[in-house]
Image (cartoon, rainbow, N blue to C red):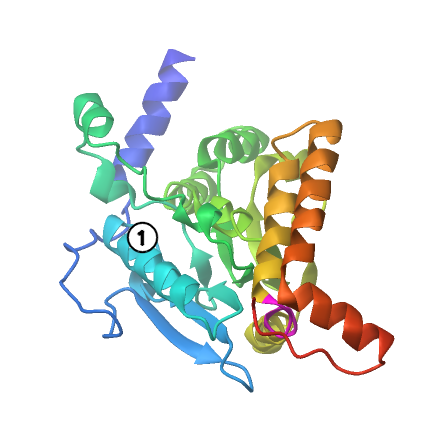
Amino acid sequence: MASLRALLLGVRSQLQLPARCPALRPFASGANFEYIITEKKGKNSNVGLIRLNRPKALNALCNGLMEELNQALETFEEDPTVGAIVLTGGDKAFAAGADIKEMQSRTFQDCYSSKFLSHWDQLTRVKKPVIAAVNGYAFAEESALLMSRASRLWFSDWTSLEKLLNTILQLGGGCELAMMCDIIYAGEKAQFGQPEILLGTIPGLVSKIFPVETLVEEAIQCAEKIASNSKIIAAMAKESVNAAFEMTLTEGNKLEKKLFYSTFATDDRREGMAAFVEKRKASFKDH
């Protein structure tokens, strides 16, 4: 086993890691970003689109990219005209995990004292619904997947093993980024790197699968439908669904009931019920 580990480490040291992410350049709100592209989409420009744009590194998640992603999320969150957000990457990769080269020299003391990666989960705190449109790689848990695949090779085909290592060692975290979103739309060529999937677990990871060329547009159309409803009620619904994963069934039902009662304090609840009774389209004001 010791010799096997040494052999794997030797191969790993020869592999090329993602290009180092340069320091985050200063930018003002609304200016062009270095690692992402943002725009408003939809007929009413009510969908915020964020496209990860670091193609040479397969959108590896460096600190600069995550800082920009968080700023874009905050901007769309505060924009009253945006009702939902779509997060996507490129054709080859949605996000190829964390940038290993950027973090390889960090120490425990450095990570612990600086709360390294503490801002990487801001996506989970966004109140507006977020849809991931995934093409290409969205991998995670690279070590487990590596050993699962490598064991099948019996370490006899070193060319295949090196190719596998070269791919896996550069991937990890992209799947988690997609899983932080509320809905996942996947292109036909999307590859999710959760080793548990090989065992038939984690069902329902993807909501729908589309042809690559229509994936992002389909995600935008879904986001438009969500954005056409009351933004405050949509936020309450998202809070209820997300909280359910952290609660017992009884506690989750109590929270859902409280949030349901809360809707009766909004103008949008009154408008929605009135429109239903009067058989007309509701005109929500997000109040």
Furthest residue in direction bottom, as rendered? 43
**Residue 22 pos. (x, y %):** 16, 55
In the image, what residue occupies the spot 39% across and 60% down? 73
Q: Is residue 206 visible?
A: no
Q: Is residue 51 left or right of residue 220?
A: left
Query: Residue 90, located in which quarter of the rendered image?
Result: bottom left
Residue at 41% over, 51% down:
96
Judging from the image, what secondary structure is the residue with disc 1 in? Answer: helix
Query: From the viewer's perspective, is 154 left or right of 163?
Result: right
- Determine which quarter of the picture holds residue 269: bottom right
In the shown orientation, is residue 215 left or right of residue 8? right
Task: Report the magenta residues as a range.
Answer: 225-230
Q: Is residue 274 magenta?
A: no
Residue 83 can be seen, yes or no: yes
Quadrant assignment for the N terminus: top left
Tell me the amino acid under the disc marked 1: Met
On screen, residue 178 above or below 56: above
